[in-house]
Amino acid sequence: MRIGFIFLAIAALALESDRFLFHPLEDELERGRFSEAQKTGERDKDPVVAPLAAMFQGDYARAKQLIRKSKPPLDPLKSLGWERLTHYVDLMFYLEKRFAEEEVHGAMRWRAPARDQVLKGGARRAFEGCRKEVAAWLGVEPAQSTLIEIYRTKNDFASASTLGDELLKKSGVIGIAKFYRVMMITPEALPFGYSWQDTLCHEYIHHALKVRTGLALPLWFQEGMARAHEALWRGQGLELSPGDREALLFAAKEGRLVEFVRMEPSLVYLKDEEEISLAFTQVALAVDQLKPKLKALVDSVAGGKTFAQSFKAVYGRPLEDFEKELHASWREQAQEKNLTKRSGALRTVLMMGEAESAEKLFLGPQIKHLLTLGDRLRVRGNGAAALRLYQQAREQEPANPYVLSRIARAESALGKREEALITAKELARSNPSWPPVYEILGEIYESRGLYKDAVGSYRRYFDFNPYHKELYKKVAFLHIDLGEPRLALPLFEAALILDPKDAEAVEAQKAIKEKK
């Protein structure tokens, strides 16, 4: 199979600076104007357009067939697009075999491998909620259904997205709206998962903006729109973690803020993951300030004006002036807070490696030393001494999740349940995007007999990592104990998606159905 060659070819294409990967009609196709693009292709006798339109519609077999039946164009530029498209269609025809049969749910087309069907229910809720809110907010409702594709491996996602391995590793990208579809990597590919429903909404917003304006909006603005509104589907506004806000203020203090011009052509080309994360925070806050007139801005760009012209017309000042004022306000906030040392709260970052690697990345030598010594004492049964070392680490970084999680578990093991609960709540407040906190909080609630609270925390954990079979069963049995067998049923069903032969889940599911 030519997968290795295809991957290298497509990955290289992603790094080229030209606006279109295959053909100038990509702008039309991103808007969902398939028939218009095909008519243009027929009029111009352009053999690239028909298979390109089929690919944009997710019909890779037809795209491959059309390529085989056609002759490569003689024009050098069109020939390059043809060659690229041929490689990409071959790749997608191969990768498509990894998906279970496509399902259609309203305006959502769903393609995912068998194990990732556990995402389907939550994905539908996020998609439908986001689509409804975006239609009400921006007046954008794509006429064509939206294809969602879930990829099992980083390599497959890197290839399908055309980002390539190196850029994926550097940027931490886990979703992309491209070629009139949303592509996401399975949460199971990351050590702690990620907020996959918010990510789906985030990418749908990108998709909707492309449908409305094509490729006319700067990508940094698209990212700001998507990041600021990704929780829209669940009725929430911009959610920034304390770690993200702290990182922004330190950057303002140290003169490291990223200018909009440096964010072009894409945030993923910035220096490193830390700068990319900072830029996401900046654009989210920028868009949040522009909120009252965002629809007018998008409509103006959709009407044919440039982004700079539209911004000045809508907001009455140049974009550069707004950016200067924004940066000045962040520097002022940093000065007022008199920042001296970091709290240890995690900024939003998506780790592609193992959990142990993620921990090492965020721990300085002193903290790491104290935690290592504490862990050794805990393993030897000296929990009290371990707790004292963890507390010493907390004095240095009071919001570090790796420190707080150890303290909470040590306190719980020593019978200090009230203290453990207080610590776990502080952990959740300071690191709301760190998935393990919700499992820890659930365990502490459960140990105190607070089953409803435990269920709530465990369910929040599934919003990041929905692949924990044993936890599905645990929460299902808690629902049964609470007299809520109806709520237990979908949890057993999720467990059986992950392991169809789990006898305990099969029997429990059967018993509930028989009692109906």
Image: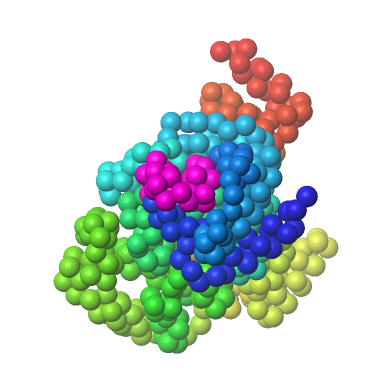
Q: Is residue 40 magenta?
A: yes
At which x and y percent is residue 285? 35, 67
Task: Give the farthest residue toward the right.
Answer: 380
Which is more toward the observer, 203 or 429? 203
Main SS of the magenta part reads: helix
Q: Is residue 23 left or right of residue 351?
A: left
Where, by quadrant of the figure, is residue 154 drawn? bottom right
Q: Is residue 393 above or below residue 231?
A: below
Between residues 332 and 144, which one lies in front from this camera angle? 144
Q: Residue at x 38, y 75 (%)?
A: 260
Query: Residue visible at 59% across and 53% down?
Result: 72
The segment highlighted magenta reads: 30-57
Quarter that holds the C terminus: top right
Can residue 199 be seen from the camera position used here?
Answer: no
| Left or right placement of residue 415 versus residue 239 in this view | right
Q: Residue at horizontal 45%, vertical 71%?
A: 265
Residue 218 in sight: yes
Color encoding of the figure: rainbow
Residue 37 magenta: yes
Return the residue found at the far bottom. 254
Percent of width and height locating residue 23: 48, 57
Does 453 sit left or right of 493 as displayed? left
Picture mark count: 0
Look at 71% across and 23% down and name the residue there: 506
State the image coordinates of residue 65 (x, y, percent, origin top left): 61, 40
On screen, residue 175 above or below 266? above
